[in-house]
Image: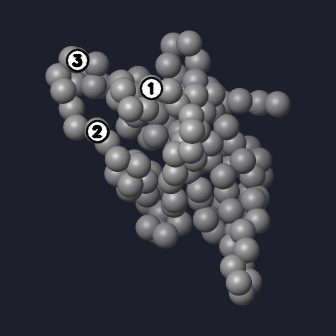
């Protein structure tokens, strides 16, 4: 699976564009999925952009179902960062599906799906 990150014509021009912030990317993911605002978190650490899906309807999903949703998420993130100098060094988009419970709250990772940047700039599903 390849997360479709081909930029639009506007993104491919040399016109200066404002930097897209991590919070804006998170909001794009929320809108794309139709998810609750608190069900999506995003962070950038080093060269890895991570999206956390918390308590999703897919919490009892199969690995393939997680892959399908993760591919959609990676596509949104990839399109948002495409051609942006501040995100050029990102080599992985990671989508983690979490369940949170207890007091104090503890997180359990249900699944992790990674997409690695190809030489063409696409983010491809990384299978191990």
State yes or no: discs 1 and 3 in contact (Cβ < 8 Å): no
Q: Residues within 10 Å of mark 1 (few under 14, many from 20)?
A: few
C-alpha distance separating marks 2 and 1:
12 Å
Quadrant (top left/top right/bottom left/bottom right) for the N terminus: top right
Res. 10 visible in picture: yes
* Residue depicted at x 50% and y 27%: 89
Where residue 87 sits: x, y (%)? 43, 32
Residue labelled with disc 2: 19
Q: Please count the marks in the image.
A: 3
Element type where label 3 sits in the image: loop
**Is residue 15 positioned above or below 21 on the image?**
above
Q: Residues within 10 Å of mark 3 (few under 14, many from 20)?
A: few
* Residue depicted at x 77% and y 47%: 63
Residue 81, quarter of the rendered image: top left
Q: Earlier in the sequence, mark 2 or mark 3?
A: 3
Q: Nearer the viewer, mark 2 or mark 3?
A: 2
Residue 105, quarter of the rendered image: bottom right
Residue labelled with disc 3: 13
């Amino acid at each position: 699976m390849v997360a479709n990150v081909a930029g639009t014509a506007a993104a491919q021009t040399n016109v200066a564009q404002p930097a897209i912030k991590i919070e804006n990317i998170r909001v794009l993911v929320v809108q794309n999925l139709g998810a609750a605002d608190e069900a999506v978190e995003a962070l950038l650490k080093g060269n890895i952009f991570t999206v956390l899906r918390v308590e999703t309807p897919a919490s009892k999903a199969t690995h393939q179902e997680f892959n399908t949703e993760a591919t959609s998420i990676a596509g949104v993130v990839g399109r948002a960062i495409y051609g942006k100098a501040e995100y050029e060094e990102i080599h992985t988009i990671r989508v983690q599906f979490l369940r949170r419970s207890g007091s104090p709250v503890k997180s359990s990772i249900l699944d992790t799906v990674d997409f690695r940047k190809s030489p063409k700039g696409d983010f491809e599903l990384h299978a191990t």
